[in-house]
Image: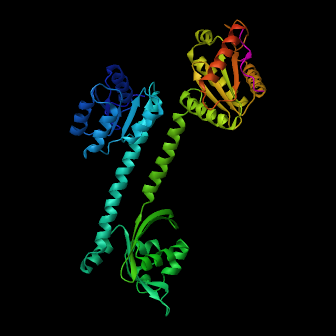
Amino acid sequence: MNPSPNAEPKGSVLLVDDIPENLRLLTDILTQQGYQVRSVTSGAMALRTAVAKPPDAILLDIKMPDMDGYQVCESLKANETTRDIPVIFISALDDLLDKVEAFQVGGVDYITKPFQVEEVVARLESQLTIQRQKQQLQQEVLIRRETEEILYQSRALLSSILNSSLDGIAAMQAVRDVGGTIGDFRCLVVNPVVAKMLGKTREELIGNLALRRLVQQIDPGLFQKFVDVVETGETLESDLAYSTSEGDRWYHYIAVKLGDGFAVTVRDITSRKQIELALQAANEKLEVLANLDGLTQVANRRRWDVCLEQEWRRCAREQQSLSLLLCDVDYFKRYNDAYGHQAGDDCLRQIAGAIAQAAKRPADLVARYGGEEFAVLLPNTTADGAAQIAALIQAAVHDLAIAHCQSDISDRVTLSIGLATLIPHPDGSPETLLTEADGALYQAKQQGRNQTVQAIASAVR
């Protein structure tokens, strides 16, 4: 969806790539998503532009003629004006060492070309959210420090500060027994905010020994923490969840030693906590969406590549069999031509659901591999076990009874499946397994489609 022409930009982004076609593609994508985009074709131009008008984020290519992306990032991080700008590398370099170096020079993320639009947008929005949170928290820390300074101002200003402060402020004096042990605290100073939080009036609190009993209702361990502040001199800073008559609230408090007692400031951070929790949930949702195929809601190619590599290494380490199914919808182009692309999309969604129902063990992974092709990863599964799952998939798709008037082999939609099984070698590559499965899929098509063919090399049973 294109943003409204009058909508406020989500943020400003600087694109750095020496290939104009890449810049045009990314500019179109991000502009449609509501970002204000500037683009340059060299590292030197990027540095000048970023210093002159710092963007909210930078998408940076690595391989460029005058300065490579690593050098540009190091220069940005060395400049006080640009050091806090998040840099996301976006490059065709897919080697692990390239990615490690990108993070070592100060990059916050790394996207491999060719990229998916959803991935770029999700990663960019995640980094901008983190940046905004960081700025917000820095501002709040500054405000808290200013509040602490106020505590040490003259007593003449104390009454005015206490009564006007939006934060809770109190000062307590230790009351010790004959052995010197702190048994309670006497309230010396308390402002209306703290009194309201404790459900008391200021008159009921000031001069009384009530802290031990009152904080016991809030947090049984809080009294001892205040004792430790007095005895050790160490500042206590933490968040506290507290149920009041108005509902659950969150408070942030700082307690510092003051004579033979302590002073404490309390701030209601309920709104901030609610925002943080909402942002956390949104980020988790974005992470899930970044790993799903938008049409079929099974894993996408990015998630597939990561899981295949992980399972290959694990099975190689444990010397367990790893099976893979490549599933291709027979005559799908004809289906699209006959029934339309909307029906084609619905067909793919139904087939993805059927495959996922058949391969539903916790470790199994179903992914859209491309177009009308699906891939199924079956860890710790022999060739016989994989063949059984392939049969379940064939049956499930058959039971969908999706009509296909243009198929040469059936009156309904069918699948051709290539099956491969290996015990991975530690020095091998998962491409071996993919190649075997792809060859088996080719044979299945050559032999008439609507069948499963097992690769000859799949000797693990």
Q: Position of residue 209 (x, y in %)?
A: 47, 86
Number of residue marks: 0
Q: Main secondary structure of the magenta part?
A: loop
Q: Position of residue 454 (x, y in %)?
A: 73, 18
| Residue 459 counted in the magenta span | yes
Residue 236 image-quadrant placement: bottom left
Q: Position of residue 54 (x, y in %)?
A: 26, 40
Residue 444 image-quadrant placement: top right
Model colouring: rainbow
Question: What residue range appears in magenta?
Answer: 448-461
Q: Quadrant of the C terminus?
A: top right
| Residue 176 counted in the magenta span | no
Left or right of 456: which side holds 7? left
Compare residues 232 and 215 and report the one nearer the observer: 232
Residue 238 image-quadrant placement: bottom left
Q: Position of residue 455 (x, y in %)?
A: 71, 18
Left or right of 358: which side holds 292? left
Left or right of 108: which side holds 439? right
Is residue 294 in sight in this rendering? Answer: no
> Is 276 placed above or below 449 here?
below
Is residue 355 in sight in this rendering? Answer: yes
